[in-house]
Amino acid sequence: MTPEELQQSLVLISSSEQKNNDFGTGFVFRQNRGSVYILTCAHVVRDVGGRDKVKIGDRPVTVVATGDENGLDLAVLRVDGLFEMPALNLLGTGNQGSSFITAGFQVLDDKHLIRSLRVTLGDRVGLQSRGLDRIQAWDLQIQDYALKRGYSGSPVVDPDSGNVIAVVIQRQQDGKRGLAICIKALDRICQIVDSDRLYHNLLKLGYRQQVRLFRKLIGKHSVAGFLIHGLPSYGQRWLLNRLLVQHVPDCFRGKPVKINLARKVRKNDVDALWRELGSWVGLRGKERVPRAIVERVYQWWQSQDILLIFHDVDCLPPKGLEQLIQDFWLPLATKVRDSQVEAIPYKLLMFLVDYQGITASWDVPLTDKIDKMDASWQPYTPIEVPKLTKFSDSELTDWMEDEMPAELSEEMERVVEEIIYNSDGGIPELTLEEICHLCDIDWYGESEKWLKF
């Protein structure tokens, strides 16, 4: 990154009060939905008169987050309509003695001059304030010119990668030295959502009844079958992956058997199901019959966890789903239950996934009598988990308060209304897509990585 390229991401922060001549520097680090997010120092916001007096050009400024209360000298601002300003990446690290660049504003007569400086990282130091964990910072040695009043909030940038490693918070020794706070400190006041963080946050949204039931059963039973069902786009596959990622023990090392029943060759053809399931367990030709498949999976179970996933069971005829349960699952679960092999630690789990929400009304061996469980009950008949429903505005509000970054949660009521409206009243997959959109993340691209099962 050249000094000229760096300057394109900088903004002058001043006061809307005519008699207040204080100012500082900020830089764009995020763009989202026609707005830019700017990082500067908390003391710059104070110096220009506080939250209501911050001015950037002629645009309205919102103070999204500030570290004032914790003694952390960083602040995040939002400005609408600055479409052309490039955002800097906040991913850098540095080493003592390395060369970096910075840039900021200084007074020149009745104007403000923007100037770039070459700096060398000095010692890495710690800042302690008001009970927070120690915050890392860098001593800066200025190689040319000097830090002037107004450089507070300037980014310290690796010229090779263009990444920001720190933010200038103080000048020392007439500007020949300075102090810059490490960029990682930003997490203390404002979570910046990347795809990984958003994924883990989304895993906490909704589906409380289903998750509570699954956790209860998986904690007490090593054998269990589940029907996940709901209308189209209600997040059946998302919930399946959430249950497995969050609540199946890390020690679960079994190879998943995944059968997609939506493929045309299997519709209305249960024999095709037996052929594919038999092939999965290593059987060939006429060996691929339910009894032999049960025996092979049972043998596997004696040395490993077994995870069986049948997607699109709604594509089977009712008789086909009945046969899958009666001729395969129940004999297998019973065989495991009656096994004389002692102390086998492995789990046997089956998921039937219905993407149309129709199978619960079929005359097949399922149970939803989960409220009548006692100590002797065993979940060999597949459990019909509560049917998936829309996310409510209260669910979204509670979730956003706990999990979402300040740039969304600051206007929570408006954002929740927007999400509900754009998701047809809270349809789960549309809701997840809309949240990703608000965070500038591609739902369709990321979900390919998130949905492993």
Image: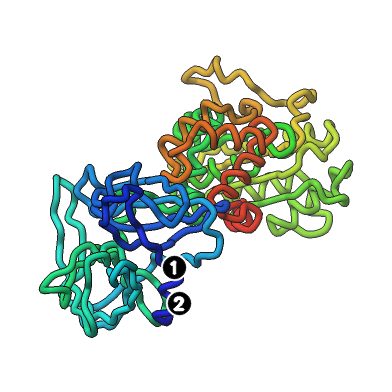
Which mark is on residue 9? 1
Indicate the position of residue 370 as horizontal and vertical percent values.
57, 20
Q: Are marks 1 and 2 in contact (CB under 8 Å)?
A: yes
Q: Is residue 67 above or below residue 216?
A: below
Q: Position of residue 247 (x, y in %)?
A: 47, 41
Is residue 331 visible in this depiction of the protein?
no
- Kind of residue at badge 1: Ser
The dot on residue 141 is none
Residue for point 28% across, 71% down:
109
Residue at figure coordinates x 29%, y 65% from the top left: 167
**Residue 139 visible at all:** yes
* Residue 406 occupies quadrant: top left
Q: Quadrant of the N terminus?
A: bottom left
Q: Is residue 264 left or right of residue 234?
A: right
Residue nearer the viewer, 127 or 202? 127
Determine the CA span between mark 1 and mark 2. Answer: 8 Å
Q: Is residue 370 above or below residue 163?
A: above
Q: How far across and how far down the image is residue 374, in percent?
A: 49, 17
Q: Which residue is mark 2?
A: 5
Secondary structure of residue under mark 2: helix
Q: Residue at x 45, y 34 (%)?
A: 219
Identify which amino acid the numbered label 2 is placed on: Glu
Classify 314 as above or below 23.
Answer: above
- Near mark 2 (Cα within 10 A), the count class, few <14, some 14-19 or many ≥20, is few
Left or right, residue 221 beside residue 224: left
**In the figure, is residue 323 to the left or right of 295?**
right
* Disc 1, SS: loop
